[in-house]
Image (spheres, helix red, strand yellow):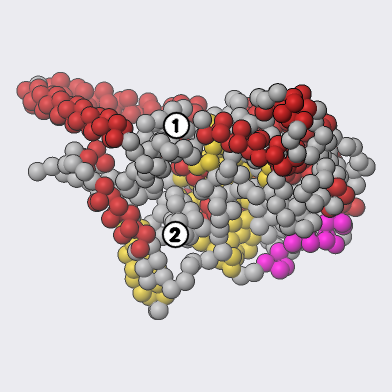
Amino acid sequence: MTKIYLVVTIWCCAVFDATSMARRLDMPLDVNKLESLGNTDTLMKSLKDIAQKSHNCGVKEIPKLRRHYLRNSTVTCNDGSRAGYYLRKSYGSKKWIIFLEGGWYCFDRFSCELRWSSKMRRYMTSKEWPAFKTGTGILSWDPKENPYYFNANIVYIPYCSSDSWTGTSPRNGDGYAFLGSYIIEEVVRDLIPRGLARAKKMFLTGTSAGGTGVLMNLDRVADLMATLGPGVEVRGIADSGWFLDIPQFNQKPCTEPLSCSPTTGIKKGFHQWRGRVPEACKKEYPGQEQWRCYFGYRMYPTLKTPVFIVQYLFDEAQILANNLINQNKLMNYNGSNELLSKEQWEYLYKLGEKVKQTLENVTAVFAPACLSHEVLLKKSWHSISVKGISLSQSIYCWENSFEGEKCITATNGSTSVKLIRPYGDAPVKAGNQSKKSQRKKKKKRKKDKKKRRRKKKKNRNRKNKNRKNKKNNRKRNKKRKRKGKGKGKNRKKNRSQRSAKNVSNCSHHLIEHCPLPQWCNSFCPTFRNQYNGKEIDFFKVFAASGMDSKGMADLLGVNMSTVTSMNANTISTLLLDTFRHKQKA
């Protein structure tokens, strides 16, 4: 009788004192054995439906993250209030996500007082933290919103240190404390007895300043876990924390972070916070040059722990800090007047090219050509895609080190494609298949069936041979044991190299090649005017920018006389058709 191992997420519901609790049991699914029985589409779809419908079995409301304060009361927020974290346990799951919140920074007494007197005060104190929080995006409990990580143990660390999670400076008198780096360490220590020590995987994740915090603390956290939980694999996911130390488009007096260039702000902050940078990067940039480690492209080559970089090519925070967009013009923009000059477009283009250049040698990266900031906590985080592969698919593929043929891509066109699903359900068609493609698939199935038969026959012959020669079989087993021991030692020594090798064939190096934001990717988030909430169409903005007719004609592939006879709306429509068509092709 053929043995079949099913992978089913089973939710067992039990009631204790009117409180419901969900438990997860995982069993390995051998898809190849199922396929050998014939068409399994209906079965796989049913398994997914069962898992999703039973997900909230016995749970009357969506579990929220509960507030916990650090046991070490000396590690505090800026104002001396107790630092802490929010936790949602998922009993039975061996996967943990620790998330670092973002929220800019302050770098001296004046900028911190300004921060304290504004809406940003919530990033400096824990006094108004609610008892519970609801997770969104990659922290969501909903499998539709978070298809791959809904069942993970979730830890959310609120940002209250204003130091990009790198500070080690205690509070002096009526001043501010900057202890972000220590807060992360203390949270990890507090989580060890709560189940983190028994985890299989731990992801240190964060957005914006939290993304920078991931890069700056990842190796240190991995080393700490090697001591406190040696069986836990540590990885990082840094979202929108990959900033560049390039000159501003318009230089302004540096009085607070929004007017300072990233370079000037970080230089000031590094000294104010007593910033702690990774040891390997400190060797590359010793002494007064350590501030350079805050810029991802400089410190990434020194990292030894695997990290996935999520970065918009035209990051809104970078553009704001570089004073590219004139705020008075933005305030009065009505959709038809000029917002960006030719020089500003050129600066924007060069910014995108520079970001692409710095990301080329990153092993795992997802970089859409969009003008936006932060994505991991957005409810639509799983839908944004590059080259037909969504962000959630790419991270899941990287995490599991799938090979190319198992990490199936999705496209925006009419080609029939497969989408990765956490329950292993049947392929989803992106469009109507032609009869020709159906015939090809039928031939392929027959061919694969023959291959499987030949493989089974070889396996039977091999088994018969092994039975006849038990002595050789024992020797082979001994060799395997010796090899296993050697591999274990190598794993401890070469954490990053091993990971890079295992995931090299997976679709996780995705950098979109597009000259300007929102031009090629229909999945880019809508960019809205912060003063009136209206959507800004970048094709219309470009058409109204006063670019010379020859340059516009070359861009559109038409002659100059055609461009001269067009109005801005016609040009923007033609730009849309040209670049979206190229993207689909």
Q: Nearer the viewer, mark 1 or mark 2?
A: 1
Rendered residue at 37%/31% (across/down): 405
Tag shown at residue 91: none
**Total numbered labels placed on residues in the image:** 2
Reply yes or no: does residue 117 show up in magenta.
yes
> How would you rate the neighbour count of disc 2 (Cα within 10 Å): few for under 14, some for 14-19, many for 20 or more?
many
Q: Is residue 521 left or right of residue 94?
A: right
| Residue on which disc 2 sits | 90
Amino acid type of the residue tagged 1 in the rendering:
Cys
Mark 2 residue element: loop
Rendered residue at 75%/52% (across/down): 529
Rendered residue at 39%/48% (across/down): 422
In the rendering, at what x and y percent does residue 116 appear?
A: 83, 60
Range of residues picked out in magenta: 112-129
| Residue on which disc 1 sits | 506
Farthest residue in the bottom direction?
A: 17
Q: Is residue 378 left or right of residue 114?
A: left
In the rendering, at what x and y percent does residue 37 appear?
A: 17, 42
Quarter of the image where the N terminus is located? top left
Mark 1 residue element: loop
Kindly indicate whether the residue at mark 2 contacts the one at mark 1 (C-beta within 8 angstroms).
Answer: no
Can residue 485 be seen from the camera position used here? yes
Amino acid type of the residue tagged 2 in the rendering:
Ser
Reply yes or no: does residue 46 show up in magenta.
no
In the rendering, at what x and y percent does residue 439 appear?
A: 25, 32
Q: Is residue 542 left or right of residue 53?
A: right
Rendered residue at 28%/55% (across/down): 46
